[in-house]
Amino acid sequence: MPRCLRCGNTASFGSSSVPAAFPGVTGSVPGLIAVFDEKGSIRHVENRGLDHQRLQQVCQTPEAYFDRCTYCGSSDLIWP
């Protein structure tokens, strides 16, 4: 499972490769967010703009897409 090296988050990550869905109070909200379970599998995806085919690619290779911590905003992540 991914882990943020700044805050230790292992649950929720966004993708900088999908344009922001809308600006938020603390910055823009990614157009693609995933919640991971304890085993590193995607448990839930919030998708605002990807078609079904690309979303399937995301689920097959999440390490290629999820590169931003949704808790602290860091891009300093590690994938085991």
Image (cartoon, rainbow, N blue to C red):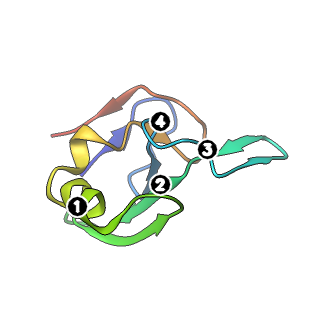
- The residue identified by callout 4 is 16
Neighbour tally class for label 1: few under 14, some 14-19, many 20 plus, Cα within 10 Å: some
Q: CA distance from mark 1 to mark 2?
A: 11 Å
> Which amino acid, by three-letter code, is at mark 3?
Ala
Residue shown at 47% from the left, 36% from the top: 16
**Which one is in front, 41 or 19?**
19
- The residue identified by callout 1 is 59
Q: CA distance from mark 4 to mark 1?
A: 16 Å
Residue 3 pos. (x, y %): 34, 42
Q: CA distance from mark 1 to mark 3?
A: 19 Å
> Which amino acid, by three-letter code, is at mark 4?
Ser
- The residue identified by callout 2 is 32
- In what element is the residue under mark 3? loop
Q: CA distance from mark 3 to mark 2?
A: 8 Å
Neighbour tally class for label 4: few under 14, some 14-19, many 20 plus, Cα within 10 Å: some
Residue shown at 41% from the left, 60% from the top: 34
Q: CA distance from mark 4 to mark 2?
A: 8 Å
Residue 27 pos. (x, y %): 75, 38
- Specify which label sits upstream in the sequence, 4 or 1: 4
Residue 42 pos. (x, y %): 28, 66
Query: Does any portion of residue 37 appear in the rendered image?
Result: no
Neighbour tally class for label 3: few under 14, some 14-19, many 20 plus, Cα within 10 Å: some
